[in-house]
Image: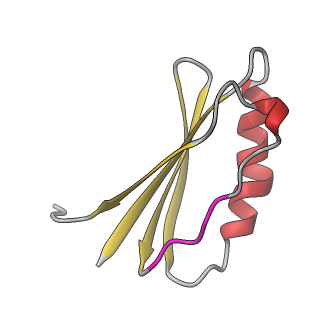
Amino acid sequence: MTLARMWEARAADGRADQLHAWVREEALPALRGAPGLCRAEVFTAPGDRVLLITWWEGRPAPVADPPEGLLARPVHRWEFTSTHVE
């Protein structure tokens, strides 16, 4: 069974580039080598949001929260189970 975990954070005003860098330089390296990690992608979205989507075989590893000063609100997290791929 493949699980996808979506991690989404909204940057504090003027901190979007710093939040994006934190995900690339801290969150992703912390996940590398985690058991079951199949794939990871980082996205940006309107509203100074940064998304990290990871795909797992088995239980996903947690993603830490960034430093509080980078955030406009708490991080949102969702998990999805893959049911169909073409």
Q: Nearer the viewer, residue 32 or 5?
A: 5
- The answer to whether residue 32 is left or right of residue 49 is right
Q: Which residues are the magenta region?
A: 59-63
Residue at horizontal 16%, vertical 61%?
A: 86
Residue at horizontal 77%, vertical 40%?
A: 21
Residue at horizontal 46%, vertical 78%?
A: 59
Residue at horizontal 70%, vertical 57%?
A: 64
| Number of callouts | 0
Q: Inspect the magenta stretch and tell me whether residue 62 lies in it.
A: yes
User: Magenta part mainly helix, strand or loop?
Assistant: loop
Instruction: Give the percent coordinates (x, y) of residue 77.
Output: 50, 49
Pick out the residue farthest to the bottom.
35
Q: Which image quadrant is residue 12 in?
A: top right
Instruction: Give the percent coordinates (x, y) of residue 3.
Output: 36, 68
Pick out the residue farthest to the front.
74
Does residue 35 sit above or below 48 in this rendering? below
